[in-house]
Image (cartoon, rainbow, N blue to C red):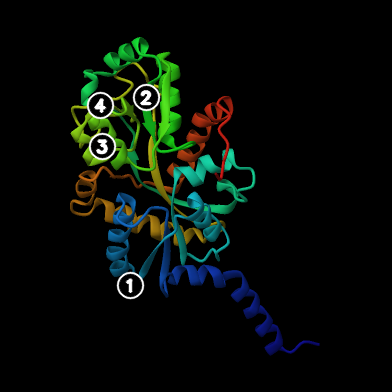
């Protein structure tokens, strides 16, 4: 026959097992948080993440350490987050490439967004833009299309196979019924230099303030940008399906406590709305977005739907070379 003390001890153990994680979640954070960032040091997303980490460390009462993880095109970051404990102390600021595109073109990647991650929020994006060389002599999307029809294989630069700029360039060429010679570049600076010199005709990178030195014909967003109010959208130019932003999002491992996700989401949204954070990052072409976790889930689903057909039709696969 069990003693009352033994029964009470067993009952308390059951309660601790059942409600312990919830209690720990309520006390989160109790120690340093690590945020892995899919952006090189000094890039707009990295600057935004470091500014957030500094300010959020003060409001949450615990340090947030930033670690840049670019290896493997973001696969190392995603794998590290997926394998971490779902306790809110390892987070990942990932991007559309590793989160959405890479799993579609690499069957060995080893993770799936819906299965292996907890969405926390859309963090920000760099809207893709259609740039043309000033030497081309065109001033609108319509004029560029007319030029391309007269000059088959007009060159268009992008950030590499499978990047959002690459896929958006393909979509634009299909919708406009033009043939473009697509050329991969490692980054926007060299692309912009070659546009200025006339070595290439056009490009489709995420917005960079230096792009104002060339001609920006359109932005691949649903609405005009606050920091480029005079630049029309592709929809205004007659190409409503050309929607493309190179976005960043905050995720954690699967099965994070909902209380931790809610607390983190609320704190970051509040930070975005404080002072002039949005205006400051607009100056470097990075839009802080924010919102609820469901908005990130929706964005992932929309981008899968938007780009899967193009990836398959053009046989775009992961090539480690």
Q: Are marks 1 and 3 in contact (CB under 8 Å)?
A: no
Q: Are marks 4 and 1 in contact (CB under 8 Å)?
A: no
Closer to the chain start, of discs 1 and 3, is: 1
Which residue corresponds to the image point at 43% horizontal and 69% vertical from the top-left? 28
Comparing labels 1 and 3, the label whose residue is closer to the camera: 3
Q: On the image, numbered disc 1 is attached to which residue?
A: 61
Closer to the chain start, of discs 1 and 2, is: 1
Closer to the chain start, of discs 4 and 1, is: 1
Vertical position of residue 313 compared to residue 212: above or below? above
Q: On the image, numbered disc 3 is attached to which residue?
A: 193
Q: On the image, numbered disc 4 is attached to which residue?
A: 133
Q: Position of residue 288 (x, y in %)?
A: 30, 46
The residue nearer to you, when weighing 225 against 107, is 107
Res 3 quadrant in image: bottom right
Q: On the image, numbered disc 2 is attached to which residue?
A: 155
Left or right: residue 308 versus residue 3 is left
Give the alpha-carbon distance from disc 1 to disc 3, as whole Å. Answer: 45 Å
Comparing labels 1 and 2, the label whose residue is closer to the camera: 2
Q: Helix or strand or loop: what does disc 1 sit on?
A: loop
């Amino acid at each position: 026959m069990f003693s009352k003390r033994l029964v009470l001890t067993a009952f308390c153990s059951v309660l601790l097992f059942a409600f312990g994680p919830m209690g720990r979640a309520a006390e989160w954070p109790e120690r340093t948080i690590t945020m892995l960032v899919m952006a090189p040091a000094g890039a707009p997303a990295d600057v935004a993440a470091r500014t957030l980490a500094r300010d959020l460390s003060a409001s949450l009462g615990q340090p947030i350490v930033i670690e840049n993880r670019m290896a493997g095109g973001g696969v190392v970051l995603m794998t590290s987050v997926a394998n971490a404990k779902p306790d809110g102390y390892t987070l990942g600021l990932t991007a559309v490439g590793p989160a959405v595109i890479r799993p579609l073109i690499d069957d060995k990647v080893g993770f799936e967004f819906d299965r292996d991650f907890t969405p926390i929020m859309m963090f920000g994006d760099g809207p893709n833009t259609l740039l043309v060389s000033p030497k081309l002599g065109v001033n609108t999307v319509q004029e560029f299309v007319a030029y391309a029809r007269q000059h088959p294989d007009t060159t268009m630069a992008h950030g590499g196979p499978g990047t959002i700029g690459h896929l958006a360039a393909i979509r634009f060429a299909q919708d406009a019924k033009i043939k473009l010679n697509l050329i991969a570049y490692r980054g926007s600076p060299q692309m912009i230099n070659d546009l200025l010199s006339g070595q290439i005709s056009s490009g489709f990178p995420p917005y960079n303030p230096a792009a104002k030195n060339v001609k920006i014909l359109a932005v691949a967003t649903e609405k005009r940008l606050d920091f480029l109010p005079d630049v029309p959208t592709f929809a205004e130019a007659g190409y409503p399906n050309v929607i493309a932003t190179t976005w960043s999002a905050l995720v954690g491992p699967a099965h994070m406590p909902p209380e931790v996700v809610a607390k983190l989401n609320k704190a970051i949204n509040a930070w975005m709305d404080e002072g002039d954070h949005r205006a400051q990052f607009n100056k470097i072409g990075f839009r802080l977005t924010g919102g609820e976790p469901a908005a990130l889930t929706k964005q992932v689903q929309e981008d899968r739907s938007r780009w899967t057909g193009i990836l398959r039709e053009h046989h775009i696969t992961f090539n480690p070379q």
